[in-house]
Amino acid sequence: ILNKQLSNSTTNHDESPHVCDRFIIEFYIRAKEVGKRAFIGTTYRGAVFPKGIVRLYRATLKQENSVVAFKPFTSTSEERLVALEFMEPETIVDDNRIKVLFVMQVKDKSVNIF
């Protein structure tokens, strides 16, 4: 539910989905706990994406100082094999979808925005 609402959300607060608001409030309330759990290292995310999105990500990453962001809430794992399980092994890949393994190297502790 959260991911659907995040992907359909607008910047207008009056139209903001209730679940998204609750999620942000929880982050704000627990900001000090999140800071204590900051991660530095390599983490993985497996997924199935439309090929058009993958092409867009690749083109973006070729640009200097580019940033790719996931709009929905995204889980990752320090274990590559765990992330591979999320590539939906039973999914038949066709002309429109592709299995993707994101490898993210987090070099610095995230800045706490609260």
Image (spheres, rainbow, N blue to C red):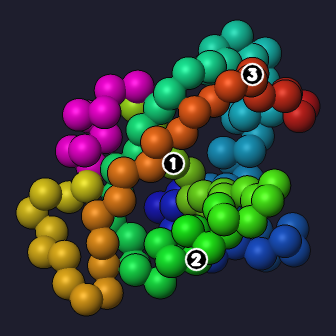
Residue found at x 79% / y 59%: 64
Q: CA distance from mark 1 to mark 2?
A: 18 Å
- Depicted 53 relative to depicted 111: above or below: below
Name the magenta segment's main secondary structure. Answer: helix
- Amino acid carrying mark 1 in the image: Thr
Residue of label 1: 74
Q: To which quarter of the image does residue 68 belong? A: bottom right
Residue 11 in view: yes
Q: CA distance from mark 1 to mark 3?
A: 18 Å
- Depicted 46 relative to depicted 7: above or below: above
Residue ranking furthest to the left: 90
Query: Viewer-proximal residue, 49 or 34?
Result: 49
- Estimate the x, y position of residue 6 in percent, counting from the top left: 62, 64
Residue ranking furthest to the top: 36
Which of disc 2 and disc 1 is earlier in sequence?
2
Q: To which quarter of the image does residue 17 belong? A: bottom right
Residue found at x 27% / y 49%: 86
Q: To which quarter of the image does residue 31 belong? A: top right
Which of disc 3 and disc 2 is earlier in sequence?
2
Residue 6 in view: no
The answer to whether residue 76 is magenta is: no
The answer to whether residue 82 is magenta is: yes
- Estimate the x, y position of residue 103 in percent, counting from the top left: 46, 42
Query: Viewer-proximal residue, 66 or 49?
Result: 66
- Please state if 114 lies on the left or on the right of 91 as rendered: right
- Estimate the x, y position of residue 89 in percent, counting from the top left: 13, 57
Residue of label 3: 109
Query: Within 10 Å of the Cα at label 2, are there few (<14), some (14-19), or many (20+) other Cα atoms?
Result: few
Residue of label 2: 56
